[in-house]
Image (cartoon, rainbow, N blue to C red):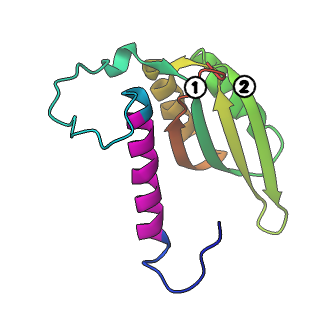
């Protein structure tokens, strides 16, 4: 389907699409074709963060120099964080690189310790993104 013309804008539209997807998923879960009433008042017990274990997506801005990737990998390894995928892109003009890492399943405590070490590494300029990945194929 293609829709052309003026609309609410990309952010409101994206929010609306996400809401529709959530409604569809809830209907599928409850085997319903109608609207599911609000479940926001159901009491749910949350998993304590220290018990959580899942893969993570991490994006780093680093100095593009020899040994940078080795230092980053060593910081992860020191905290028992196993790396599943690593992608590095370089900007030759600025002598900077972006490294994107997806880990294997890791405890929250080990991930946070690794991030603390990374923050003080001289080659790491910024940790720009850390997102938990909820995908059973990566765990």
**Residue 52, position as x, y percentages in the image:** 42, 18
Q: Secondary structure at mark 2?
A: strand
Query: How many neighbours does mark 2 have within 10 angstroms: few (below 14), some (14-19), or many (20 or more)?
Result: some
Query: How many neighbours does mark 1 have within 10 angstroms: few (below 14), some (14-19), or many (20 or more)?
Result: many
- Residue 38 vertical placement versus 63 (above, below): above
What residue is disc 2 on? 84
- Residue 90 vertical placement versus 46 (above, below): below
Numbered circles on residues, count: 2
**Residue 66, position as x, y percentages in the image:** 84, 42
Q: Which corner quadrant of the image does residue 133 belong to?
A: top right
The structure residue drawn at horizontal position 63% and vertical position 46%, both measured from the top left corner, is 60
Q: Which quadrant does the C terminus fall into? A: top right
Is 19 a magenta residue? yes
- Residue 97 vertical placement versus 1 (above, below): above
Question: For this rendering, which residue is in front, 132 or 119?
Answer: 132
Residues in magenta? 11-27
**Residue 101, position as x, y percentages in the image:** 68, 36
The structure residue drawn at horizontal position 42% and vertical position 78%, both measured from the top left corner, is 8
């Amino acid at each position: 389907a293609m829709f052309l013309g003026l609309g609410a804008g990309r952010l409101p539209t994206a929010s609306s699409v996400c809401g529709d997807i959530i409604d569809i998923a809830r209907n599928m879960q409850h085997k319903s074709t109608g609207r599911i009433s609000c479940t926001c008042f159901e009491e749910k017990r949350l998993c304590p963060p220290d018990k959580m274990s899942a893969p993570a997506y991490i994006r780093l801005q680093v100095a593009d120099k020899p040994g940078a990737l080795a230092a980053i990998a060593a910081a992860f390894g020191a905290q028992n964080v196993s790396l599943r995928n690593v992608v590095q892109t370089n900007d030759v003009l600025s002598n900077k690189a972006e490294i994107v890492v997806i880990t294997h399943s890791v405890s929250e405590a080990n991930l946070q310790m690794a991030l603390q070490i990374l923050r003080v590494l001289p080659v790491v300029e910024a940790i720009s993104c850390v997102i938990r990945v909820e995908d059973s194929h990566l765990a």
